[in-house]
Image (cartoon, coloured by chain):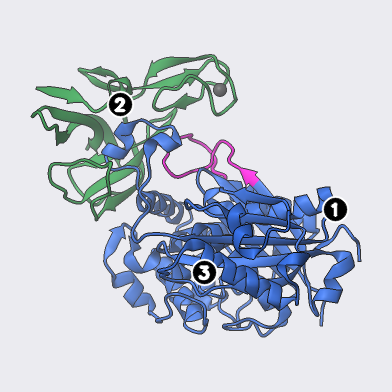
């Protein structure tokens, strides 16, 4: 049994794609989806699938376990980054290692976040090295 | 003196650090110290503003200070609370015709990184559950990018910490007064790359109070009043990089600090290069580096050389955070911005409690910055000796 950490974050899971919104007036993309545009104050926005590849814009590794509401089965240091997808820069986990270089290519992936009390495995998104 | 000019005539501050008592006790100590500093009593105060990020109500300070019937406004604007409180006091004095006002800020925080709730910031629970709602990782992500963009070495961050603890070691009200070297800062436990344990401020306790007077009264109350030449507040625009942001816009970056500082310099009629002593928000070492650039005090990318040259030390060209800043004093949120003003005011008056800038500065500057993307700046001046 599995579930997504938040259904609304995803445009699809096969292939995995994140969902944001795009503004009809100024073309700004935001993530996650919202019903207004913070860039131009417009309200004519619609749901859009975001690009699935990009480059590391910044990164850090979390060396201590965050306080609640963070959930994990067992803490180990993990990387977080901002990934430049082109129309928008999205924050997410950087998967598979704890040291990164700004500018390196990455692609979107699904990854396990934690196991619910009822045994259900919860998946979230992250970015893995693409080269 | 113009009667529209507002001056700081009294300052009071508690020691910063751990405090076991009630928050209002701290605030009362600071208020009484600031009133004693200009030989006034609470009965003389016509208007008050109080800021805290905690659960107590600043406007209930009247229960301790005296039920004189004055208006008392409460401010709660995160890390910018001190600057907003000062601006609120200035504006209230000018709008309502008050001659004497008191501005107090205090907090008494528990240990450890602030636990933040996604819902308070309008973000879904997924964001906190996946470990991204962490202030230290935000600071790290921001300075990591900044160092990359301006080709500066991470060792710059070690210099910031060394300077902070060097200043604090001489300051009787500072919290963490043990000097550390650049190497010790660099070699300490990594919290969030590139920031180590000695590069962060920690939550603690403290209170600061200022007494303000209009120009017609200031010089009777104080030998060397400090003019509040500007106090400005700005919010974020597209291109700013704020805490708890699941996304950022591509393109040129800016910050509310850029706008608040520019407005302060314009109001005061000075250039950033005129500033002789300053405080910038140093929630961690990287924040100080970025804020020196964003406020215009130092060119972006020139900070590393400035630290290596000692420019920001007490005998340098631009002494910065001369009481140890947030890194050495912690950040009791309500008090922190007023601590900056307290320190710069004393530097301009030539009576710093720690290291005194020897060059007789007459123009000072303060800058606070905080969630969810607001900044408040002041320009403070004295007449030359
Ligand atoms: Zn728009």
| B81 up-or-down from B207: above or below | above
How far apart marks 2 and 1 lie (CA) works out to 59 Å
The chain to which mark 2 is attached is: A
Residue B110 at what x, y percent from top left? 37, 59
Near mark 1 (Cα within 10 A), the count class, few <14, some 14-19 or many ≥20, is some
Expressed as whole percent of the image width and height from the top left, the position of residue B365 reads 67, 64
Q: Quadrant of ligand 1?
A: top right
Q: Is residue B213 left or right of residue B249?
A: right
The residue depicted at 48 percent of the width and 55 percent of the height is B150
The residue shown at (27%, 38%) is: B129
- Spot occupied by residue B302 in the image (x, y as percentages of width and height): 55, 64
Give the quarter of the image for residue B275: bottom right
Q: Is residue B340 left or right of residue B157?
A: right
Magenta region, residue range: B234-255
Q: Nearer the viewer, residue B355 or B339?
A: B339
Q: Are marks 2 and 1 in contact (CB under 8 Å)?
A: no
Q: Which chain is blue?
A: B
Which element is circle 2 on? loop
Chain of the residue where label 1 is placed in the rendered structure: B
Looking at the image, is mark 1 or mark 3 earlier in the sequence? 1
Give the residue at mark 2: A52
Name the spot of residue B214 as percent of width and height, x first.
Answer: 83, 63
Are the residues flagged by discs 3 and 2 from a single subunit? no
- The circle on residue B325 is 3
Are marks 2 and 1 in one subunit?
A: no
Q: Marks 2 and 1: which is nearer the front?
A: 1
B377 sits left or right of B116 in the view:
right
Out of B254 and B207, give the one closest to the viewer: B207
Q: Determine the colour of chain A.
A: green
Mark 1 sits on what residue? B97
């Amino acid at each position: 049994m599995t579930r997504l950490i938040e259904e609304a974050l995803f445009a699809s899971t096969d292939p995995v794609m994140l969902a944001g919104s795009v503004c009809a007036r100024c073309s700004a993309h935001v993530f996650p989806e919202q019903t207004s545009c913070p860039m131009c104050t417009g309200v004519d926005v619609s749901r859009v699938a975001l690009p699935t590849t990009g480059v590391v814009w910044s990164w850090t590794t979390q060396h201590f376990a965050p306080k609640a509401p963070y959930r994990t089965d067992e803490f180990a240091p993990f990387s977080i980054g901002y990934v430049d997808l082109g129309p928008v820069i999205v924050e997410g986990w950087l998967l598979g290692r704890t040291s990164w270089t700004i500018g390196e290519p990455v692609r979107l992936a699904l990854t396990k976040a934690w196991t619910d009390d009822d045994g259900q495995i919860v998946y979230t998104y992250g970015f893995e090295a693409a080269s | 003196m113009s009667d529209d000019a507002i001056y700081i005539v009294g300052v009071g501050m508690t020691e910063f650090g751990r405090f076991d008592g009630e928050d209002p006790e701290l605030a009362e100590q600071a208020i009484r110290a600031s009133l004693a500093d200009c030989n006034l009593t609470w009965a003389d105060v016509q208007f008050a503003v109080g800021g805290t990020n905690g659960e107590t109500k600043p406007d209930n300070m009247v229960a301790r200070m005296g039920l004189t019937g004055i208006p008392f406004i409460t401010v709660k604007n995160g890390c910018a609370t001190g600057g907003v409180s000062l601006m609120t006091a200035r504006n209230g004095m000018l709008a309502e015709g008050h001659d004497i006002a008191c501005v107090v800020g205090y907090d008494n925080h528990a240990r450890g990184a602030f636990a933040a709730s996604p819902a308070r910031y309008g973000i879904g629970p997924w964001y906190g559950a996946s470990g991204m709602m962490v202030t230290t990782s935000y600071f790290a992500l921001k300075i990591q990018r900044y160092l990359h963009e301006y080709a500066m070495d991470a060792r710059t961050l070690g210099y910031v910490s060394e300077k902070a603890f060097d200043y604090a070691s001489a300051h009787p009200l500072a919290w963490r007064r043990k000097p550390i070297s650049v190497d010790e800062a660099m070699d300490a436990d990594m919290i969030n790359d590139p920031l180590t344990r000695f590069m962060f401020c920690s939550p603690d306790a403290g209170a600061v109070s200022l007494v303000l007077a209009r120009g017609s009264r200031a010089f009777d109350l104080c030998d060397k009043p400090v003019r509040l030449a500007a106090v400005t507040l700005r919010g974020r625009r597209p291109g700013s990089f704020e805490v708890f942001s699941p996304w950022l816009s591509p393109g040129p970056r800016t910050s509310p600090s850029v706008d608040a500082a520019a407005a302060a310099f314009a109001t005061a009629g000075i250039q950033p290069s005129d500033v002789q002593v300053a405080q910038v928000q140093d929630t961690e070492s990287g924040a100080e580096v970025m804020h020196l650039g964003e406020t215009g005090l130092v060119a972006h990318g020139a900070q590393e050389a400035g630290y290596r040259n000692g420019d920001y030390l007490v005998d340098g060209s631009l002494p910065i955070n001369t009481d140890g800043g947030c890194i050495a004093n912690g950040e009791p949120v309500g008090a922190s911005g007023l601590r900056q003003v307290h320190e710069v005011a004393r530097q301009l008056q030539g009576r710093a409690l720690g290291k005194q800038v020897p060059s007789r500065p007459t123009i000072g500057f303060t800058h606070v910055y905080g969630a969810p993307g607001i900044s408040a700046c002041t320009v403070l001046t004295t007449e030359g000796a």
